[in-house]
Image (cartoon, rainbow, N blue to C red):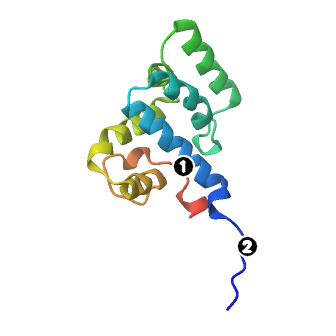
Amino acid sequence: MRYEKRENVLDKPIVHTLEQISRLVLALAGRNQPLADSLWPEVISYDFWGLTTGQIWTTSWKADKSREAWTETLLKDSQTKHIAEFLLRLKDLLPITTLEQQLDLLVGVAESDVKDYQLPMRSPFF
C-alpha cells in the first residue's frame, strides 16, 4: 500500500488561528501583558468576530492613547467586551482543563459556562 501525502493539516489557517488564540490565552494566564498586547490585534482581526478594520484600529488608538493594556480597552468597549471576557474565562479554566478541553471550548463542542462566548467557527471548519 502506498501512502501519498496530499496536504498537511498543520498548514491550514484554522490551525494557525487556534494556535494564536491559545498563545493569547497563555499570555493572559502568565500575566505577560506585552505578549498579550502583541497578540490581541491579530486575534480580534479574525473575520468570525465580525469586527471592522476601523473598529480594530480605533481599539488600538484607544489603548495607545490611554496607555492601558489591550485587554482593559477591549473590556470597556461593548463591541469587543464579549471577546475579551471569553478569552479571560478560558485563561481562568487553564488550571482545571486539559488541552483537549480547551480546544473543545474554543471550537464550541464542549458544554460550559463559557458556551455563550464560544468562537463562532465550528460549522465552517469542522
User: Where does label 2 land, which residue?
Assistant: 6
Q: Residue at x 37, y 42 (%)?
A: 90
Q: Residue furthest bottom?
A: 1
Depicted 82 relative to depicted 102: above or below: above
How crowded pointer 2 is (Cα within 10 Å; few <14, some 14-19, many 20+) is rated as: few
Classify the position of the C terminus by image quarter: bottom right
Q: Residue at x 62, y 14 (%)?
A: 61
The picture quadrant where one finds residue 32 is: top left
Q: Nearer the viewer, mark 1 or mark 2?
A: 2
x and y percentages locating residue 27 in the rendered image: 44, 32
Instruction: Say what amino acid the circle numbered 2 marks.
Output: Arg
x and y percentages locating residue 67 in the rendered image: 52, 9
Classify the position of the N terminus by image quarter: bottom right
User: Where does label 1 land, which residue?
Assistant: 18
x and y percentages locating residue 84 in the rendered image: 45, 32
Foreground of the two, 99 or 61: 99
Of mark 1 and mark 2, the one earlier in the sequence is 2
Foreground of the two, 71 or 55: 71
How crowded pointer 1 is (Cα within 10 Å; few <14, some 14-19, many 20+) is rated as: some
x and y percentages locating residue 97 in the rendered image: 30, 51
Instruction: Say what amino acid the circle numbered 1 marks.
Output: Leu
Left or right relative to 87: residue 21: right
The picture quadrant where one finds residue 108 is: bottom left
Q: Residue at x 59, y 54 (%)?
A: 15
